[in-house]
Amino acid sequence: MIGANELKRKMVISVEREPYMVLEVNVAAPSARGAQTMVKARLRHLLTGAVSDRSFKAGERFDEPDVEKVEASFLYRDDQGYCFMEESTYEQHYLDAEHVGEARPYLTEGLVVTVLKYNGAIASLQLPVYVNLKVTATDAVRKGDAGSSSGMKPATLETGLEVRVPPYIAEGEVVRVNTETGEVAGRAV
């Protein structure tokens, strides 16, 4: 059992016998005597993808649902959806765009993600914190800007994701992108 005051991001809990992933947690300390600490959480339903905001008393407890974490590679996207293959069993699974959700602009062929399976079916994806993506369009490097990081310029990456990059990044380079913030963390190593 997990207490409401122990909730953390990316934790999976069962609320009213339904599986949810915790997206954000805020603890509100009481300002009046005798008031209870409240925990406000933003939750994503693992099966439907619906996001909701819920408040819990600090003493509330939650079960951990029977969720299995499995490594899977992203293979391709077609009319049926996004195809992933489990690393251990080579079993292939299709997910529609709605279930892939915010992960879409970070998926490249061969990317290994963590898949959450609930009752044997894929319920959601967890991306690695950083992914490497190729810059397909950006302004040219201007003389004098190559060593400067004073300003940022817009760039489009191979998946269509639009980001801001330092002025020394040129087309064709591979950058490291934080999947939680969508910000570029520099050149890929």
Image (cartoon, grey):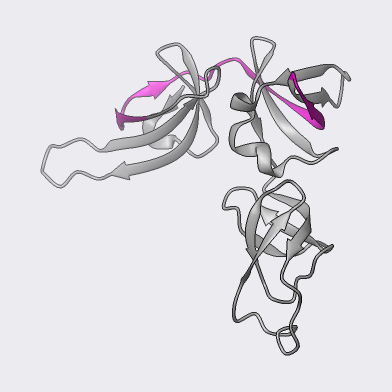
* Chief secondary structure of the magenta portion: strand
Q: In which quarter of the image is the C terminus?
A: bottom right
Of 143 and 113, the residue lying toward us: 143
Q: Residue at x 53, y 32 (%)?
A: 11
| Residue 92, percent from left and from top | 83, 18
Q: Does the magenta stretch include residue 59?
A: yes
Magenta segment includes 54: yes
Q: In this view, does 54 lie to the left or right of 127?
A: left
Q: Is residue 166 above or below residue 47?
A: below
Above or below residue 48? Residue 137 is below
Left or right of 83, for residue 62: left
Residue 144 occupies which quadrant of the picture? bottom right
- The boundaries of the magenta stretch are 53-80
x 84%, y 62%: residue: 172
> Whole-percent x and y of residue 161?
66, 50
Seen as rendered, the residue at the extreme bottom is 144
Q: Could you tell me residue 179's position as x and y percent?
A: 64, 48
For image coordinates 70% across by 84% down, the residue present is 145
Please give left or right for residue 5 compared with residue 63 in the image: left
